[in-house]
Image: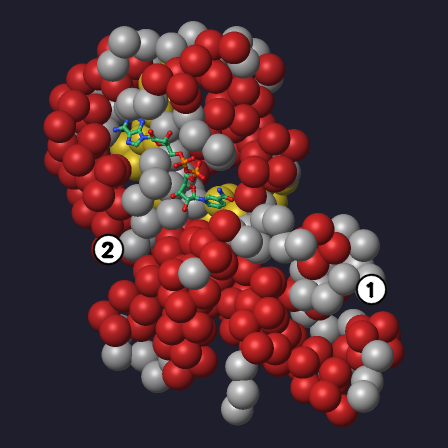
Amino acid sequence: MTRIAFLGLGHMGLPMAKNLVTAGHEVHGFDLVPAAIDAARTAGIPVAASGAEAVADAEVVITMFPAGRHVIAAYQDELLAAAAPGTLFIESSTIAVDEARAAHELALAASHRNIDAPVSGGVVGAENGTLAFMVGGSDADFADALPLLEVMGKRIVHCGGPGLGQAAKVCNNMVLAVSQIAVAEAFVLGERLGLEHQALFDVVSQASGQCWSITTNCPVPGPVPTSPANRDYQPGFAGSLMAKDLGLALQAIEQTSTDARMGRLAQQIYAAFADGDGATRDFSGIITDIRAGEG
Ligand code: NAD
């Protein structure tokens, strides 16, 4: 049994914290939003009066916040000072690589330990305890975090030193965005050439173009009955989240002067998608914009 402070009880954090409680850990949660606090209490998670109170007695602190600025502010303003020296901070929000490294340095300077452990798998993965964790940090801290990550996730990869969990996440989502756009373009091109959706699916899903964006997240209704296209693109993985992650990818591309033209283009395409009604639709709904457009 580990004493855990879980901060950020939103769409992802609440079910993750719930799984830790179910596994027998002592969890004290906290969120800034009253509705999230109420939902946590209803789910059986004890809620502290503040972040500082939640971490005071904790061996492990898990944060699941919207963005890097929330992490840095919470670390600096209250969490690092309130926690006992040697506390292991597991930072699971999706944030920039350099923000993750800054958070790591802040934690170390305050005599704590820290790993970055962003996730993929969405709300369904959080609920089912099947998230993928990409971890950056020392071998010892990874080993200590592993039993808890295994409660919340199924596939846990130690990617290297501080920040490299976030690096893996940003690279993966760049691949995902580019492949989802490519698959959508292929279906629209096929339509214009007179090709049935099912025929194109039967070829590509078994050929060298095979990828998750067609076999699981197929952007047209029919071939994969569970894909968001069959429910008018209800997410799934919302366009706003993909746009956020590609913003982090673009930041990394520019900082490293990487020749990532497809990644840059994907960032522009999803930024425009999320500016409209794509923000709340699954990111495979990009096919609607492609169909409406002209080359
Ligand atoms: P969310 O907005 O639903 O939840 C974040 C919560 O953090 C909010 O309830 C907010 O009030 C709380 N918060 C912010 N600052 C706080 C503080 N100082 N103390 C306590 N609580 C604080 O977001 P989410 O969908 O749960 O996503 C969380 C993170 O996970 C994001 O970084 C997101 O990019 C990433 N992520 C989300 C998904 C997804 O499908 N939703 C998938 C993978 C990764």
Quadrant holding ligand 1?
Answer: top left
Disc 2 residue type (three-letter): Asp
Badge 2 local density, few (<14 within 10 Å), some, or many (20+)? some
- Residue 241 location in percent, x, y? 44, 52
- In this rendered view, identify the residue nearer to me: 277 or 71: 277
Q: Which mark is residue 223?
A: 1
Residue found at x 52% / y 91%: 295
Q: Mark 2 and mark 1 in contact (Cβ < 8 Å)?
A: no
Badge 2 element: helix
Q: Is residue 275 visible?
A: yes
Would you place residue 233 above or below residue 89 in this image? below
Q: Is mark 1 within 8 Å of ligand 1?
A: no
- In this rendered view, identify the residue nearer to me: 190 or 159: 190
Q: Which residue carries the number 2 mark?
A: 98
Residue found at x 55% / y 68%: 286
Disc 1 residue type (three-letter): Pro
